[in-house]
Amino acid sequence: MAGPPLIIWEREVEQLLLYAELVPRLEDALGKFSRRDNAEVIQPVRTTVALQKHNGFLGVMPTYMENDGLLCAKFVCFYKRELGSALPATQATVVLLNPQYGNVEAVMDGDVITGMRTAAVSAVSAKLLMRPDAEVLAILGTGKQALSHYNVFTEMFSFKEVRVWSHRKEGIERFRQSVSGPVTMCVSVEEAVTGADVIVTVTRCTEPVLFGRWVKPGAHVAAVGACRPNWREVDDVLMKEAVVYVDSRDGAMTESGDVILSGVEVFAELGDVINGTKPAHREKTTVFKSLGMAVEDAVSAKLVLDKWKHRGK
Ligand SMILES: NC(=O)C1=CN([C@@H]2O[C@H](COP(=O)(O)OP(=O)(O)OC[C@H]3O[C@@H](n4cnc5c(N)ncnc54)[C@H](O)[C@@H]3O)[C@@H](O)[C@H]2O)C=CC1
Ligand SMILES: O=C([O-])C1=[NH+]CCC1
């Protein structure tokens, strides 16, 4: 008989996950996903159940990575909140199962995993797609994802300036106090993104907040919010001017309003670039549209579990 599952909560996950260890595992997982080999990865598009009364959705995100012996599912609730609401936009739990017997081995907090793996994948997109001389990073939004993106982008790259915009002044002030490095606080999106080399959009917007007319040619945009087919974060002009990369083509064609409603053609998955089957157009304006994938959660959770088992050794 299997023992009871391990329960690993937020503070422990926070202590165990490090970007330096997470990033290479995510790159490997993105590459495996894009090879479409069922022995490596089975990952259907996320199933979503509408929580109409609460203006939200439950997303169920399973994956099986046979060669890695990994069976995992994340449950993530995400909401369209009122402007200024203090309630979280997402809440998540990750479950690791034994693929041979089907028992649950570990249940862990999914919020830190979601924050860190999403930001780390955006950083991978920048590593592959931004111009090598990039100096200015602009972050739109000041919530959980904004913070994790700030942390990994400043750990992996040396930007001369990091600009931050939020629709609320208090949001920017809170953000400035929670980060260790300098930030330039911007009063408008236009001010934040004009001349920026890399732009990260991490808002709860459901209408475009970033407009192509403000984006410098050759900039790289990691568009992380707007994960429903009728939600937008960036406008048609930007989508049509850019070479568009995604985490999952099927995911983007099912869930991304920015892709579906602009009618653009997806050029490649990040995994295709990692595998060397599609080029990285660093010289052009690029958009990485992120929806989030179960393989990212699975390899993150496995890293947490392995480190939990070896802690103190
Ligand atoms: N692609 C992916 O893998 C993932 C995407 N997400 C998405 O990322 C976005 C940010 O998530 P969190 O940082 O956790 O949320 P959060 O609630 O912590 O922060 C959201 C930010 O958006 C701002 N905001 C809210 N409404 C706005 C509006 N109408 N216009 C402009 N700004 C607005 C808030 O002031 C806040 O700064 C959400 O859309 C979420 O669904 C979250 C997890 C994973
Ligand atoms: O992958 C993920 O966890 C999510 N994507 C959009 C909301 C949550």
Image (cartoon, rainbow, N blue to C red):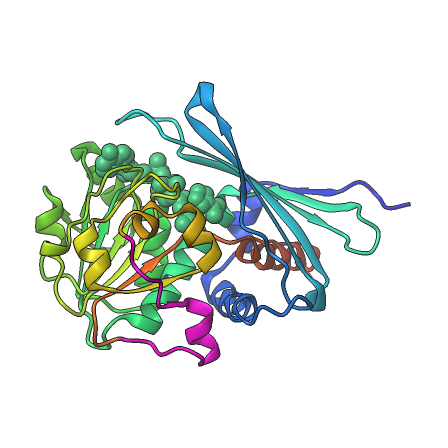
Residue at (64% x, 59% y) in the render: 42
- Residue 204 screen position, x and y as percent: 31, 37
- Residue 54 screen position, x and y as percent: 44, 21
Judged left or right of residue 198, residue 40 is right
- Residue 265 screen position, x and y as percent: 33, 62
Task: Verify whether residue 273 appears in magenta.
Answer: yes
- Residue 255 screen position, x and y as percent: 42, 46
In this view, the residue farthest toward the top is 53
Judged left or right of residue 173, residue 249 is right
The quadrant of the picture occupied by the C terminus is bottom right
Front residue (pair 200, 284): 284
Which stretch appears magenta? 263-281
Determine which quarter of the picture holds residue 29. bottom right
In this view, the residue farthest toward the front is 263
The quadrant of the picture occupied by the N terminus is top right
Residue 230, relative to residue 274: is it above or below?
A: above
Front residue (pair 109, 122): 122
Residue 154 in view (yes/no): yes
Q: Quadrant of ligand 1?
A: top left
Task: Verify whether residue 207 appears in magenta.
Answer: no
Residue 144 in view (yes/no): no
Judged left or right of residue 34, residue 98 is right
